Structure formats: structure tokens, C-alpha cells
Image (spheres, rainbow, N blue to C red):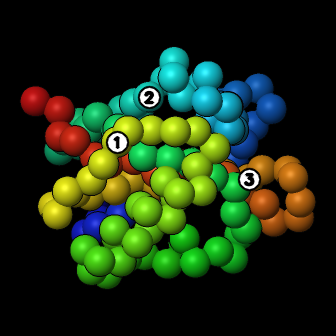
Amino acid sequence: VGDWCTTIYGHSMQDDTMFGSLLDYKKQEYYDEHPVLWYFTPGQAYKVELIGGYLTTAYSEVYKAPETPEERDALAARVKNNSTFVSGVTWEEDSRLLMLSTCSYEADDSRYVLLGKLVPAV
């Protein structure tokens, strides 16, 4: 896991493999049914409490890795404020984030990003 935010890129496959189902988060109903994800690393499992998801471009500032807590907060606020769904998830001073990114097809170079707070599973 990176310092403040880890980004994982994946293809949006039509058969919902890889990151195909991420695009379902464009609808509030899907978020309501799936408000958390799980992220497993060799050393730790994490619950990912989703903050927001939104459409952007492949060249968006959202892809600039935050280097400070302030930049992390700005990233999380940007995603939450532009989200296609409403989430009550907040983040704290020591929160680490996970961003998932995949292609979307509204326009050339469209991307959908999903951002969540990593919570170590016990």
C-alpha cells in the first residue's frame, strides 16, 4: 500500500470481469447494495469503505498521487463532491485511500474512478 493513495488500473470488460462492474457505481442503487469492497494484500486484508466515484478523463489531476495529507484530503473531497452516488463515508488524518480506475465510454479517453478508505480487517 502506498503512502496516501494507491491507484489500481483495470480494463472494463463487457462480461463484468476485471473492472467491468465498476461502471455500475454510476447508479446510486448499485452503491446502496455494494457500499464496501475488499482489498487483499500478502500482509493484510482491508475493507474499502467507498467515498465516491465519478467520470473524468485519462489526463485528470485525480491521477496525481497525493504527497501530503492535505493533497489526500483534496483528492477525496474532489471525488466525493463529483460522485455519481452519495456516500456518508468520511476520512481521518491517518486514512489511506484506494482508487480504482477503468475506461468509460461517454467520450474519448473517459475514465471512471472509484475511491475508498482502507480499513484494516482484523
Could you say which disc has been placed on residue 63 in the image?
none
The residue drawn where x is 49% and y is 78% is: 64
Identify the image quadrant of the N terminus: bottom left
| Residue 10 in view here | no
Amino acid type at circle 3 is Cys
The residue drawn where x is 44% and y is 28% is: 35
Amino acid type at circle 2 is Pro
Q: Picture quarter containing residue 122?
A: top left
For residue 122, above or below residue 79: above
x and y, in percent, of residue 93 in the image: 17, 63
The kind of secondary structure element at disc 3 is: strand
Name which of mark 3 and mark 2 comes first in the sequence.
2
x and y, in percent, of residue 50 in the image: 42, 40
x and y, in percent, of residue 95 in the image: 22, 57
- Between 79 and 47, the one lying in front of the other is 79
Amino acid type at circle 1 is Val
In the picture of the structure, the residue carrying the numbered disc 1 is: 89
The kind of secondary structure element at disc 1 is: loop
Contact (CB < 8 A) between labels 1 and 2?
yes
In the picture of the structure, the residue carrying the numbered disc 3 is: 103
For residue 110, above or below residue 67: above
The kind of secondary structure element at disc 2 is: loop
The residue drawn where x is 49% and y is 54% is: 80
Disc 3/disc 2 C-alpha distance (Å):
21 Å
Disc 1/disc 2 C-alpha distance (Å):
9 Å
The residue drawn where x is 61% and y is 30% is: 28
